[in-house]
Amino acid sequence: MKRKLVLRDLVCDTSAIQYLHQLGILDILNKIAGKVYVPTAVVNELKIGIINGVDLPVVTEIAWFNVIHPQGEKDVSLLSDMGPGETEVMMIALESDEIIAILDDGLARQRASLLEIDFTGTLGIMLDAKRLGLIEHIKPLLTKLNTLGFHLSTTTYRMILNKANEV
């Protein structure tokens, strides 16, 4: 059994859970984080996706996922034009300096920067997992992400391969 490598707690948006699951590497979240939180809005988005036939995990059946609801309405006015998943991820991240938000949506990432929320994305999680020896190669995962509909520019693709030492 590998030693659990604890970074910080994570709060996940729908896209990261979807793509890591579809890549078959969802469990890396549990290996790189202290705790992994999923907002109730994200649980609901995943349920809707499952009903619509999308290959998604049932996070309430995975013991290491912690379903959480934001406690307050802190700075919610700054988040009103985003989806419910991104909004709750950011609200939870605002409630604790110890939580890193996992966000892939461009607008959500811009807002996180403005609000000084620590964040990463699906690709950042994959890079961390590679650095920690949890995945061997990122390039085939990037290729598969592309086929799954993950939006990845050529510049970002090259940058991730460079950071992963796979150029």
Image (cartoon, rainbow, N blue to C red):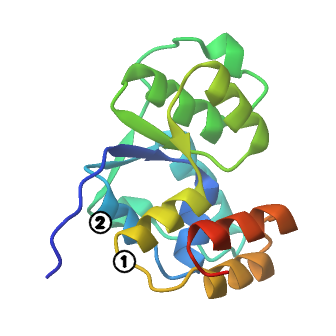
Q: Can residue 50 be seen in this view?
A: no
Q: What element carries label 1?
A: loop
Is 136 placed above or below 26 here? below
Is 103 placed above or below 108 here? below
| Apparent side of residue 118 relative to residue 33 in the rendered image (left or right) | right
Question: Which residue is drawn at the image coordinates 65% and 58% (left, top)?
Answer: 48
Question: Which residue is drawn at the image coordinates 64% and 88% (left, top)?
Answer: 140
Q: Quadrant of residue 136?
A: bottom left
Q: Can residue 85 be seen in this view?
A: yes
Quarter of the C terminus within the rendering? bottom right
* Residue 4, percent from left and from top: 19, 65
Residue type, numbered disc 1: Leu
* Residue 10, percent from left and from top: 40, 46
Residue beneath label 1, please?
134
Is 58 placed above or below 90 here? below
Question: Which residue is drawn at the image coordinates 80% and 65% (left, top)?
Answer: 152
Q: Quadrant of residue 124?
A: bottom right
* Residue 68, percent from left and from top: 38, 38
Q: Are marks 2 and 1 in contact (CB under 8 Å)?
A: yes
Q: Residue furthest right?
A: 154
Q: Of circles 2 and 1, which is in front?
A: 1
Is 37 placed above or below 19 here? above
Residue type, numbered disc 2: Lys
| Residue closer to the observer: 166 or 120 | 166
* Residue 90, percent from left and from top: 55, 30
The tag on residue 31 is 2
Quarter of the N terminus within the rendering? bottom left
Q: Using the numbered discs, state the Cα–Cα distance from disc 2 to disc 1 in whole angstroms.
A: 8 Å
